[in-house]
Image (spheres, helix red, strand yellow):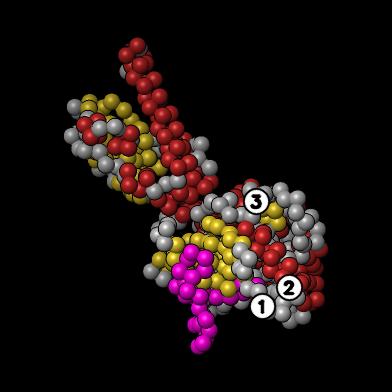
Amino acid sequence: MTHHPTDSPAVDIPIDTAPEVPAGAALPEKIGKYPVLRKLGEGATSDVFLCRDEFQGRDVAIKRVRHVPGDDEDALRYSDRFFAAEAALVGRLQHPNVVKIYDAVLESSTQYLVMEYVAGGTLRPYCRADQLLPLEQIVEIGFKCAMALGYVYRQGLIHRDVKPANLLTVLNNGAITDVKISDFGSVLNLDSDVTQVYRVGSLAYMSPEQLDGSTLDSRADMYSLGAVLYHLVAGRPAFDAQIQSALMHQIYHAAPPPLVGLRDGVGQALDAVIQRALAKAPQDRFADWDEFAQALSGLIARHEVPRGQLQGVLDSERFNLLRKLEFFASFGDVELWEVVHRAKWRRFPVGHALYRKGDQGRAFHIMAQGAVEVFRDGEKVAALGAGTSVGEMAYLAPSPDLRTHAADVLITELATTISFVPETLAQLSVGCRHLFDEAFIRVLVRRLHVAHERLAHPRRIL
């Protein structure tokens, strides 16, 4: 996890790059049991360090509350409050697009959070007019954030500080491949009986009802995400003023300038989705996070944003494809994201043999698109389409002998498959593997039923 100087005095927020530690500054050797590797950054109330969790064999980001000698009682309460908000979420948020909080430690001399380390930056640099991301990548980022914030809301939480500096980028060879929501110090816990603090967040991305101190629901975060997407598309915020009162007046009363015309490739459809998220009244925004996410992914599916460098299949497209398949009917959003990221997605031409009789099974395939036919000794015995599995004995069989294929499986329609080998399946969470087991049981029961019908009523089957 990386951290950035705060946009407002209300919260401690991430920074984009790790600053050099000033000459003479004391870098602690350890924080608790964690050796310190380097300083990542600092915010209004804390310092963040890259540390090593030797027991788990992974790097972690540790946010340590900074108590400066002479801090008054209000300042101490302020920092303690935001620490407590995140500490209450230890182990609670398990989503591929949310930074994990592993532990919270409160000792007599220090308090700190142990979090997932994300070796990237934040989205702040990409809000500049000279570093704008491709439109389809912005929409993809928006889709992932909407799905993640929907998950957060289902846990009874409203983030209240969604902004570019709190959205961390996952980089692969210098390219953004994923995004993770961070910094829950301002979170509103709807299930907590602890007195909540209102009017926290960053003004430029804050909804009108959040400014009012009104009762909030998920649509407050929806507005903030809309403001982030507007900034990423336009290279400037939806509202901007040097004086705070003037900015607040714009948020309450002004309409954001249309995005059409501010940048090449922005059409009415993209502008409409973002403008709806930025509606002044919550009831005029999307009804829920799923509707917002589907509106974003629909822009890609309908080719309403130009495709640039991301010419392959996007994660949002894969996710929505999985949602439609019978095999994954019982999978939740979190488990579907695991499949999107862990599975090997492959395309096969007509006539390709997925398996030949006598082959040793290592991988199984779930048909996402297309069809196969199964031949035993030259005789067609089955035809399988999208949503069915092929070769699952590679995973289920208790002995190697049972993993030898007894039939030929040929592609009969251009196919896209989702494949796993035992090693990658083992990397899935226990809950996700359990859902795979249940899906395979349903497949086997169906096939046993078909086999029984074939024996009992051969004329009907043929």
Could you tell whether 129 is left or right of 443 in the image? right
> Measured along the vertical axis of the image, is residue 262 above or below residue 283?
below
Q: Residue at x 36, y 21 (%)?
A: 448
Q: Quadrant of the C terminus?
A: top left
Disc 2 on helix, strand or loop?
helix
**In the rendering, which numbered label is found on residue 282?**
none
Which of discs 3 and 1 lies nearer the camera? The answer is 1
Q: Residues within 10 Å of mark 3 (few under 14, many from 20)?
A: many
Is residue 19 rendered magenta in the image? Answer: yes
Could you tell whether 427 is left or right of 18 in the image? left
Look at label 3 and name its amino acid.
Tyr
Q: CA distance from mark 3 to mark 1?
A: 35 Å
Q: Position of residue 3 (x, y in %)?
A: 56, 72
Look at label 2 and name its amino acid.
Ala
Is residue 129 rendered magenta in the image? Answer: no
Q: Which residue in the structure is indicated by mark 2?
A: 75
Q: Residue at x 73, y 67 (%)?
A: 77
> Measured along the vertical axis of the image, is residue 99 above or below residue 397?
below
**In the rendering, which numbered label is found on residue 68?**
1
Q: Position of residue 44 (x, y in %)?
A: 65, 75
Q: CA distance from mark 1 to mark 2?
A: 10 Å
Q: Which residue in the structure is indicated by mark 3?
A: 153
Q: Residues within 10 Å of mark 1 (few under 14, many from 20)?
A: few
> Measured along the vertical axis of the image, is residue 379 above or below residue 57?
above
Q: Which residues are magenta?
A: 18-46
Closer to the camera, 374 or 177?
177
Could you tell whether 152 is left or right of 193 in the image? left
